Amino acid sequence: MQISDRDLYFRIERLYARYQRCIDDDELELWPNFFAEKSRYKIISSENYEQGLPLGIIDADSKSMLEDRVASIRRANIFEDHRYKHFVSAIEVTEIAGSIVSIIANYQVVRIDIRGNAMLFSVGRYKDKISFDQDPPVFLEKLVIFDNQRVDTLLALPL
């Protein structure tokens, strides 16, 4: 892949911004489109991740599973109406292998309830693999490693 560092970081930043906005603006039906057909989306505690324990809160291994998750959120799950605001920082490219770029970034998600109260919902890091074989680029893997000790039972929306 022949792309300058500046252009690469710009494209990565745009991908993250669109990803965050899709979730934050409740356009969840578009969310699976950020992933390749064969991809992985996993939310796991930092404790399990660091000990090599595979159990995550969510572990989807295809775009189809993410589409099913959105359908479940829309039709089957019952939860208090709320929204998120994502903040991603310290994006760092850790490896480039052909058109596949590995990224690590910090994230913070603030949850806003129906009364307008905001609370820090989740904080941690993303370990992502992004394919630049297509435009726009897509996630081959999005590993969400959360640092908070407990997860609110209201983990309905993607992180």
Image: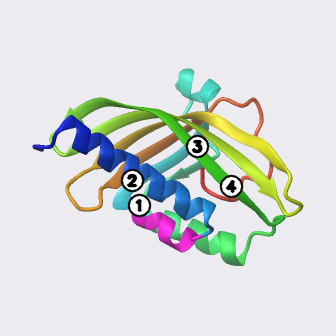
Give whichever of discs 3 and 2 has the lower sequence position: 2
Which disc is residue 84 wearing?
4
Q: CA distance from mark 4 to mark 1?
A: 18 Å
Extreme residue toward the right, this view: 115
Between disc 3 and disc 1, the foreground one is 3
Magenta stretch bounds:
27-33
Q: Mark 2 to mark 4: distance in Å?
A: 18 Å
The residue carrying pointer 1 sits among few (fewer than 14), some (14 to 19) or many (20 or more) residues within 10 Å by Cα, namely many
Where is residue 19? Give x, y as percent: 48, 57
Mark closest to the chain's N terminus, 4 or 1: 1
User: Badge 4 local density, few (<14 within 10 Å), some, or many (20+)?
Assistant: many
Element type at marker 3?
strand
Residue for point 31% across, 40% down? 9
Marks 4 and 3 close (CB-CB < 8 Å): no
Quarter of the image with the N terminus in it = top left
Tell me the kind of residue under disc 4: Tyr
Mark 1 lies on residue: 34
Mark in front: 4 vs 1: 4
Which residue: 53% across, 73% down? Answer: 29
